[in-house]
Amino acid sequence: MSQPQYAIMRFAKYKGPEITNIEAHNERRKEKYASNPDIDLSRSKHNFHLIEPPQRYRAEAERQISAAGCRTRKDSVRLVEVLFTATPEFFQGKKLPEIRQYFEEALHFLEQYQAKETIISAVVHMDEKTPHMHLSFVPLTPDGRLSAKEIVGNKKKLSWWQDKFWEHMVVKYSDLERGESASQTGRDHIPPRIFKEMTRLTKQRQKLDQLLAGIGPLNGKKRAAEISGLLDSYIPAVEKMRTQLKKYSTAFTSTKAENEKLKKKNKKLSESLDEATHESVLKQLKDAKLQREYQEALAILERIPPEIVAAYKIGPSVERSVHHG
């Protein structure tokens, strides 16, 4: 299995008028989808419901809310949508019944934490790039309050949701790894020790850099021995970092373009006072830096004379990453 496969679950909250737009997309009510070129209408016939909406989303949400005796304000969240999917590799080669089973499992998961009768619709789209399910529910708590805040929660609770979802799905699908809820978890589950380890790895890389820079015919043998000595701890450290970053998946999600965007965004935010967002952007920049440093740690292995590397039985994963990194 070359690519890591992730179980993916994301939450979105909707207050009022936008509920109709969400419904139009989920239930394929529009004739044409000019705004979404990913939709292949010839495949729309393969879309299916696990839960059919009893009526229009907004009307059903209002019905449930008033039945529960909840008062609403204009800005009350009336609908929560959960997107369930997995990385594209996971679905490769799977037939429709197997795909259906995956989403049924995701639905069973949610029903453990949210009353079934609050779920308005669960529809699986097979006509876009990757199969995914839009599940929409009214955020009513077990004691009948309307509170998306309590159900979906803050960063910590979102991280809890990700853990629970993965724990549930991995029982049947052992290949799956814990996903990320995009920016919502603030990517805050990379433990500080990993940043510390990366600092140590970077120091070793700099030392390796110096040794490689000064290699020549006169000191070649002596340098080779020093480099070999350093590689004894360097290669296992790179390998360990690779495993850890894979586990937290984050470090592999940010591209150069994203980094640039973040830098600009960070500059703008520094001028504004939105500290919470500012914090999460700084956090993402920190994560992007972690990835960059890891890529540099890999890249330096390419500069080591092949005869020295040959003396090492580098794990296939590091070797593979070297060629692609």
Image: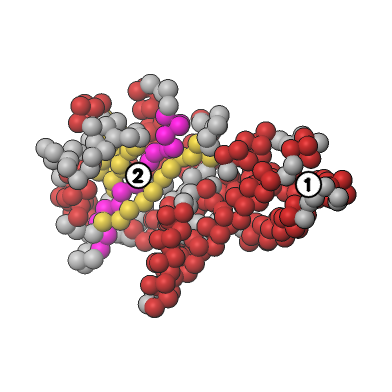
Local SS, label 1: helix
Using the image, tell me which numbered label, if any, was put on residue 231: 1
Residue neighbourhood size for the residue with mark 2, other residues' Cα within 10 Å, grouped as few (<14), some (14–19), many (≥20): some
Tell me where the magenta segment starts and ends, as one range: 76-91
Where's residue 217, x and y in %? 82, 47
The answer to which of marks 1 and 2 sits earlier in the sequence is: 2
- In screen coordinates, is 79 left or right of 111? left
- In screen coordinates, is 179 left or right of 240? left
Asked whether residue 42 appears in the rendered view, the answer is: yes
Is 54 one of the magenta-colored residues?
no
Name the quadrant containing residue 209. bottom right
Is 85 one of the magenta-colored residues?
yes
The residue at 78%/51% (across/down) is 215
Out of 53 and 217, give the one closest to the viewer: 217
Name the amino acid type tagged 2. Leu
Where's residue 183, x and y in %? 43, 56
Name the amino acid type tagged 1. Leu
Local SS, label 2: strand
Above or below, 293 relative to 225: below
Residue neighbourhood size for the residue with mark 1, other residues' Cα within 10 Å, grouped as few (<14), some (14–19), many (≥20): many
User: Which residue bears the numbered disc 2?
Assistant: 83
Quadrant where the image shows the C terminus: top right
Which of the two discs, 1 and 2, sits closer to the camera? 1
- In screen coordinates, is 39 left or right of 240? left
The residue at 68%/61% (across/down) is 199
Above or below, 132 relative to 216: above
